[in-house]
Image: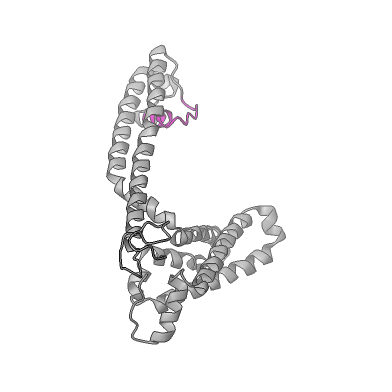
Amino acid sequence: MSQPQFKHFPHIRQKLFVIVFGTETRAGKLFDIILLWAIVLSVLSVMLESVREIREAYDSLFFISEWFFTILFTIEYLLRLFITAEPKKYAFSFFGIVDLLATLPTYLTLFMAGGSYLVVIRSLRLLRIFRILKLGRYLREASVLSNALAASRYKIFVFLGAVFTLAMIMGTLMYMIEGGESGFTSIPRSIYWAIVTITTVGYGDIAPQTITGQAFASVLMLMGYAIIAVPTGIVTTEIAQAEKNQKNAESSKRQCAACGKKGHEKEAIFCSNCSAKL
């Protein structure tokens, strides 16, 4: 990431920018490692706190750890606002909102005291689990997956529309064939059964009793296996293409310092033109 030009406190902000947003320096790597462990430990604390026996035994420890992580993430959030050239843009970005949500739940509980609000407070504290989203910033492969999903979104929407249309048709037919005696009391309930059957979940709370209904159900089950493979193939193809594009982009940035040739492979050690070490 290129360093922005700062108007106020340029030296301090540029040094902090390299540490917080960069990963090339030793300090930047150390900052990322500390933050990664803080995210993982805070999420683990939330999950363990939901276990009643553990919560009752270590209630004070959970209280201290929660405020420790909240203050730590608050400092990180304010630090990012301070060193970013456009604080407003960062604040309303995806990771800016995630960073804010990582700190808000604990502070909100301070203003919602009282017995009638206990259930609400407990729900707000559970929002801390969203801190796991902060990990996305440090996963290089996350960009490949997000690009693949974005590229295949229209195909997936069309596919889901086709599946839902099929579920409506099959659900309506099952409602006509089976009726309320077999549990198909309405078309929406029959569509629910069709969706459960297509996805091969099969709860078993509704089942056809007639031979015709069972024949329809058998066809729908076989179709379900074929349908599951479609989105997998779509996303897999887009992931392969996204990885190829990212690899090409990275190789195009590699330039030989001796002769200036660009486009070296990521794994290359020597220049293909002058044999100088890259």
Segment colored magenta = 191-206
Is 198 part of what is drawn in magenta?
A: yes
**Residue 78 showing in the rendered view:** no
Horizontal and vertical percent position of residue 18: 44, 75
Horizontal and vertical percent position of residue 54: 69, 56
Residue ID at (50%, 61%): 131
Spot the residue most to the front: 274
Front residue of 77 and 254: 254
Residue ID at (36%, 37%): 233
Front residue of 73 and 187: 73
- On-image quarter of the C terminus: bottom left
Front residue of 115 and 176: 176
- Relative horizontal placement of residue 217, taking residue 151 as reference (left or right): right
Is 270 part of what is drawn in magenta?
A: no
Horizontal and vertical percent position of residue 207: 46, 22
**Residue 20 showing in the rendered view:** yes
Location of residue 208 with respect to 14 vertically, above or below? above
- Relative horizontal placement of residue 261, taking residue 121 as reference (left or right): left
Residue ID at (31%, 68%): 259
